[in-house]
């Protein structure tokens, strides 16, 4: 899979904001969705947000701590796919 550099750049920027504790006031942890909803067969991650299908499905009902944990996993995955 060739990962789209602009999508990865956007995710990296979002990871930085999440780590810095920045979010939209009153909205909590933002969704990582980048509207590129296509799964990579090799990794099982979405090509837009690097989440698994289980993480995508759970997002809407997840509490803030669970969402933060998903963002941490996204940050780890980002390190493995960035050139």
Image (tube, helix red, strand yellow):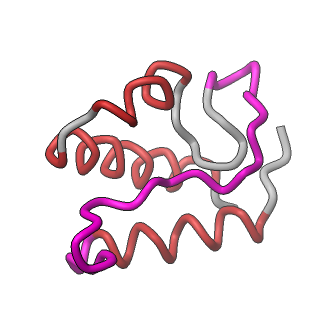
Q: Is residue 12 magenta?
A: no
Relative to 36, 20 lies left or right: left
Relative to 57, 69 lies left or right: left
Image coordinates for residue 35, horizontal then vertical, percent? 72, 51
Q: Nearer the viewer, residue 9 or 79?
A: 9
Relative to 54, 63 lies left or right: left
Q: Which image quarter holds the N terminus?
A: top right
Image coordinates for residue 15, horizontal then vertical, percent? 41, 67
Q: Main secondary structure of the magenta part?
A: loop
Image coordinates for residue 27, horizontal then vertical, percent? 29, 66
Q: Residue at x 52, y 69 (%)?
A: 12
Relative to 9, 19 lies left or right: left
Q: Is residue 38 above or below residue 76?
A: above
Q: Residue at x 50, y 31 (%)?
A: 56
Q: Nearer the viewer, residue 14 or 8?
A: 14
Q: Residue at x 35, y 78 (%)?
A: 17
Q: Residue at x 45, y 54 (%)?
A: 31
Image coordinates for residue 68, horizontal then vertical, percent? 24, 50
Q: Nearer the viewer, residue 35 or 14?
A: 35
Most extreme residue toward the front is 26
Q: Nearer the viewer, residue 40 or 30?
A: 30
Q: Is residue 43 magenta?
A: yes
Which residues fall within the magenta stretch?
Answer: 19-44
Q: Which image quarter holds the C terminus?
A: bottom right
Q: Is residue 61 above or below residue 68?
A: above
Q: Is residue 46 above or below residue 19?
A: above
Q: How many numbered callouts?
A: 0
Most extreme residue toward the right is 2
């Amino acid at each position: 899979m060739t990962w789209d550099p602009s999508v990865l750049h956007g995710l990296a920027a979002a990871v930085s904001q999440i780590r810095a504790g920045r979010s939209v006031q009153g909205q909590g942890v933002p969704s990582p969705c980048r509207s590129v909803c296509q799964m990579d067969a090799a990794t099982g991650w979405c090509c837009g947000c690097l989440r698994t299908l289980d993480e995508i499905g759970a997002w809407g009902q997840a509490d803030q701590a669970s969402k933060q944990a998903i963002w941490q996993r996204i940050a780890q995955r980002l390190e493995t796919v960035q050139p």
